[in-house]
Structures are given as structure tokens and as C-alpha cells.
Image (cartoon, grey):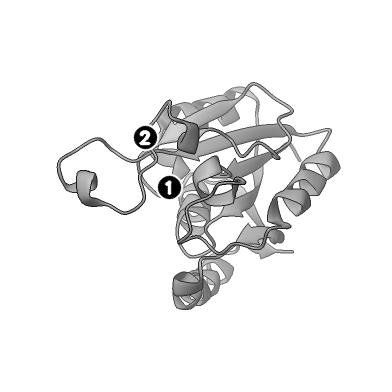
Amino acid sequence: MNKALLVIDVQEVNLGENHHRIFDYDRELVCRINGIIDENAGNLTVYVYNYTPKNFINKFSPVKCYENTPEAAPAKALKIVSQYSFGKYAGNAFTNPELDKLLREKEIDTVEIVGVDGGACVPLTALGALERGYTVIVNEEGIGTFKYYAGRKKKFDEKLKHLGAEYK
């Protein structure tokens, strides 16, 4: 098994010291993710960051995370152990074709996923990985879910388990 750890959207806007007030993630989540990064020391670690598209509608969004801004930066407490990082403008990290390209080049067959959000980007990325033939491990110890997405998380979890994703 060749495994990669995908760290999804652990950014200042949602998990940093000055995170947007709308996000209520457990403040210990980054510490747990760092522990999972340590546990995966022998595996490829890839960071994925979510960006807000610059368009007219998003000007009115209460939360903005434009590329190359302080909000979009990795959370300061996040352990960075590799130079591999990819941006995305949609929930599924595989919408950036460079991610799949890297994983294929490194002969990765299994991805373990941590990060935010358990009701959006994490399961959408897991679905994207399954569609591409990867074995998927969803590590719930390292996943944060926005309180308003709890119902969505439950539905995604059921779907992912049905499709063969492993949960730990």
C-alpha cells in the first residue's frame, strides 16, 4: 500500500487564531491533525487549500478566502512537512487535476483524509478519490464539522461507507 495523507482546508480563515467568527470548530482540531501528520511520517502528505473565486456574487459573502491573502494561508499552528500543496475553488480537491497527477506519479493507491469540513470538502474529496479508484480512509479524529453541516455529514458518511470508504 502506498498512502498519502490529504490535509483539507486547514487555513487561517477557519482554524487560525483569528478565524472568522462563523466557524466553531474544536480548537484542538489542529493539534489532532498534527498528530495524524506525525503518524503518517512515512507517507506522502499533501495540503489542499480552498479559495473563494473572485466574482461579483462573492463580494457579498460574509466569509472570503481569496488566494494569497492572510485568511487563505495555512493555519499557523498546522505542521507543514512537505512542499506539496494545491489550491481549489470547489469542494472536491480533485477538481484540481494536479492533485491526481501527483498521486499517480508517486504510485499512491490509498488516501487518508483529514481537515474541514466533514459536511462539505472532506466528503466531496473522498468521493472524488473513490471515483478515481483510490482506497479512501476518512480519519474522523482529524475532521471538523461546521454545526450547520452536521446533517449533511451524516448523509455523506452513509454514502461513503456504502461506496467502500473506511472510517477510523
Task: Count numbered badges in the picture.
Answer: 2
Is residue 108 at all visible to an observer of this figure? yes
Camera-side residue of 52 and 45: 52
Secondary structure under the numbered disc 1 in the rendered image: loop
> Mark 2 or mark 1: which is in front?
2
Rounded to the nearest angstrom, the CA distance separating label 2 from label 1 is: 17 Å
Q: Tag 2, which secondary structure? A: loop
Q: Position of residue 104 (x, y in %)?
A: 57, 28
User: Which of the two labelled residues, at mark 2 and mark 1, occupies the earlier sequence position?
Assistant: 2
Residue behind mark 1: 92
Residue 163: give x, y in percent of width and height.
53, 65
Give the residue type that dot 1 points to: Asn
Give coordinates of residue 57: x percent, y percent.
Answer: 17, 47
Please state, as top left, top right, bottom left or bottom right, where the N terminus lies in the image. top right
Rendered residue at 66%/36% (across/down): 76
Where does the C terminus fall, quadrant-wise? bottom right
Q: Which residue is mark 2?
A: 66
Q: Residue 117 location, x and y as percent? A: 52, 58
Circle 1 residues within 10 Å: few <14, some 14–19, many ≥20: many
